Image (spheres, rainbow, N blue to C red):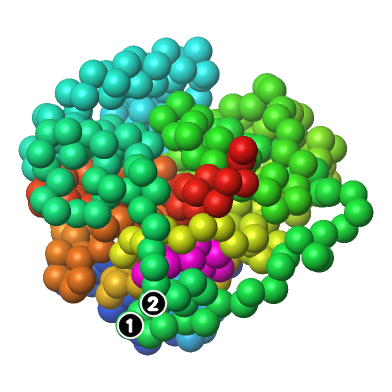
Amino acid sequence: MLRADRRNGGPDYSALDPCVHCGFCLPACPTYLVTGDEGDSPRGRIVLMRSLERGEMSPNDPGLLEHLEGCLGCRGCEPACPSGVGYGRGLEAAREQIFHARGLSPLARLVLGVFRYGKIWRPLFAMARALRATGLPRLLSGRGRLGFGMGMLASSAEMTEQAEKRKAVGQQGGSPLGGWTGGQRDSGPAGQQQHAGEVRSVSHTDPLSRRPADPPTVVLFRGCVMNALFSHVHEATKRTLRVNGYRVIEAGGQVCCGALHEHAGDVGSARSLAAVNVAALEDRADFIVVNSAGCGALLKDYGRLLGSDAAAKLGARVRDVSELLAERGPRRGAAVGLDVAYDAPCHLQHAQRVHEAPLAMLEAVPGLRLRILPGSDRCCGSAGIYSVLRPAMARAVLDSKIASVAEARPRPDLIVTGNPGCLMQIGAGLRAARLPIGVAHPVELLDLSYDEAGFYE
Ligand code: SF4
Ligand code: SF4
């Protein structure tokens, strides 16, 4: 039986040391809320991880595997913990130990193998884009496994394209999304948005007055899924950053960030991918901008993953797009009159601890009626490749979020969230529930607002 040994560089479980088994984290755990089983709770999983560390349980124990593989890795339990337990670090250690003992399941090996090599995922995603362009995924989206997958692909389309197609097939149901592509303007008071039922006042300070003489340089991290299916978000990222005084450059030679591999315990593959990205991005710019929360969380952590000064230096310069824009105000655009609900990606709020910047970005869009719905801080069930490996639990976790959206009055026109997996998972869930609500990355709304204001002419 493999026993964890920190002294020899083995998995490090010390982040779990502060746990006093109080159970305050239980109500924050999406899987525990679904099953009510202590083994599906953070506290129960910590007990299992400690047993694994001490060698009291085998990495092949079916019960241990069931509960640890059933964890979303969302880290929603961390902010709920009064003792400061680093649950995510403990989970990484356990999954690394299990990976070394028994490898990956055939399905996980297949999926992670695809993302390991650009020569495989690039043509596969090109085929997915071609399929998306036919409109079939939108028509075939539904509740079954195939229908849900089609809904995910359909939800990766540009928000304006989604709105146009919904209108064309008569699924609009009266949503203002139909008029959105023409740039719906709102006659309400600019500078006021609704947030959690309250109207928030927004600063009208011109952020451009705070620009330094030399614009900071930003290099875009392209990633894999984001680059293949959400290139429109990359374009929106570049345009909005430029409007706010950044000089945006591109860098070739990038690969998948490695987050999917690290979360599965395949730290060796994650390190190989990270090393390629460090070589591609180091010393290229003042900042590395990322618009995918999952990728951003790992890029910021490359120093720990690789243990090199170059990786740590690079990690310190990584920013979510919302952080860079919030740093500059950001500049306000033209009004866009939509009801929008913000859903916080787990790896932005819990892993990166970025809370206010996405809201500041949305508040720069006058006329937007911005809300935070109940449960918006809870995982959607996407969780990297979790929704592929454990679709039943992923859907059960998603259902409570979709129910919260369905109950909201007024019903939002759009759910915005800054992670590709969340966009596709929530988008597919909305389609399966036949709710005429779109999904978009927050930067797409700012981009639309800037376009309406004529900033790109
Ligand atoms: S992780 Fe934190 S909140 Fe959960 S049982 Fe341990 S000490 Fe309590
Ligand atoms: S990471 Fe998420 S799913 Fe896992 S124990 Fe914590 S809250 Fe529950």
Question: What residue is shown at x 36% (from left), y 53% (from top)?
Answer: 184
The percent coordinates of residue 334 (x first, y second) are 51, 58
Q: How many marks?
A: 2
Residue 392, can we see it?
A: no
Examine the rendered structure and indicate whether residue 448 appears above or below residue 230: below
> Quick one: 153 or 297, which is closer to the camera?
153
Mark 1 surroundings within 10 Å by alpha-carbon count, few (fewer than 14), some (14 through 19), many (20 or more): few
Q: Position of residue 263 (x, y in %)?
A: 46, 46
Question: What element does badge 2 sit on?
Answer: strand
In this rendering, position of residue 310 left or right of residue 119: right
- Does the magenta segment cover residue 15? no
Q: Residue at 15% across / 64% down in the picture?
A: 406
Q: In the rendered view, would you say 444 is above or below 376?
A: above
Q: Which amino acid lies under the numbered mark 2 shown in the image of this protein?
A: Gln
Does residue 366 belong to the magenta stretch? yes
Residues tagged 2 and 1 counted as in contact (Cβ below 8 A):
yes
Quadrant of residue 237 in the image?
top right
Res 34 quadrant in image: bottom left
* Residue nearest the viewer, comparing 128 with 263: 128
Q: Disc 1 marks which residue?
A: 197
Asked if ligand 2 lies within 8 A of label 2, the reply is no
Percent position of residue 95, x then y? 44, 48
Disc 1 residue type (three-letter): Gly
Q: Tell me the quarter of the picture where residue 205 sits.
A: bottom right
Give the magenta-colored segment's residue range.
359-369
The span from disc 2 to disc 1 (Cα, nearest Å) is 6 Å
Q: In this picture, is 397 found above or below 372?
A: above
Quarter containing the C terminus = top right
Look at 70% across and 53% down and name the residue there: 244
Report the residue marked by disc 2. 194
The residue at 45%/52% (across/down) is: 445
